[in-house]
Structure formats: structure tokens, C-alpha cells
Image (spheres, grey):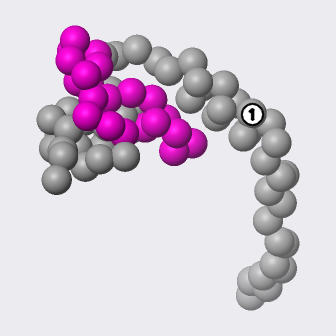
Amino acid sequence: MAICEGCLVLHRDGKIAYCSEEVDGGSCAGYGLPHLAGIMSCRVSPRKVRCRHCEENLQMRMVMAPVFVPEYTPVLVN
């Protein structure tokens, strides 16, 4: 079975950002194959670069999110 030596990096929305092998000058064996170094979120990438895709996705989710209104539960205090 084929396996990639790198780490698969995902965006916040679950889409594949890249494989660490591609950044290091190699080539990924395939995004659908197991990755020896595992899976990492791009927001904790050691590259210290903010991902524009993730930032735009997060802003859109915050704008489209329903307003949270907690239910008011009256509490009687003696």
C-alpha cells in the first residue's frame, strides 16, 4: 500500500490545504492516501503564516451565524 511521507494540512472548513512534502520541495503521493506524519490544521502550521482561505471562511461563518439569545430563566432569591 502506498503512503505519503508528509503531513496533510487541512483548512478550518476541512478542505485540504497542502501536503508538507509539497512545501519542502517533494511531491505528495496523493491526498487520498495515508500520511506518515499525520494530519494537521493549517492554523497551527509551523510556517507562522495566517491562511487567507481560513480567515475569510471564519469571517463568513461569523457573519452568517444565527444570533445567540439565551433563554431567560427567572431565579427567585430569598
Image coordinates for residue 20, horizontal then vertical, percent: 26, 26
Q: Amino acid at mark 1?
A: Met
Q: Residue at x 52, y 39 (%)?
A: 15
Q: Residue at x 15, y 35 (%)?
A: 5
Pick out the residue farthest to the front: 1
Image coordinates for residue 54, horizontal then vertical, percent: 56, 29
- Residues rendered magenta in the picture: 10-31
Q: Which element type, helix, strand or loop, lies under badge 1?
A: helix
Query: Which residue is labeled 1 in the image?
Result: 60
Q: Residue at x 22, y 12 (%)?
A: 25
Q: Is residue 24 magenta?
A: yes
Asked where in the image residue 69 lies, by quadrant, the reply is bottom right
Q: Is the C terminus in the top left, top right, bottom left or bottom right quadrant?
A: bottom right
Residue 45 as seen in the image, left or right of residue 43: left
Q: For this rendering, which residue is in front, 75 or 56?
A: 56
Q: For this rendering, which residue is in front, 7 or 28?
A: 28
Q: Is residue 21 magenta?
A: yes
In this picture, is 14 found above or below 48? below
Tell me if I can see residue 38 in this picture. Answer: no
Image coordinates for residue 52, horizontal then vertical, percent: 57, 18
Q: For this rendering, which residue is in front, 70 or 47?
A: 47
Q: Residue at x 83, y 79 (%)?
A: 74
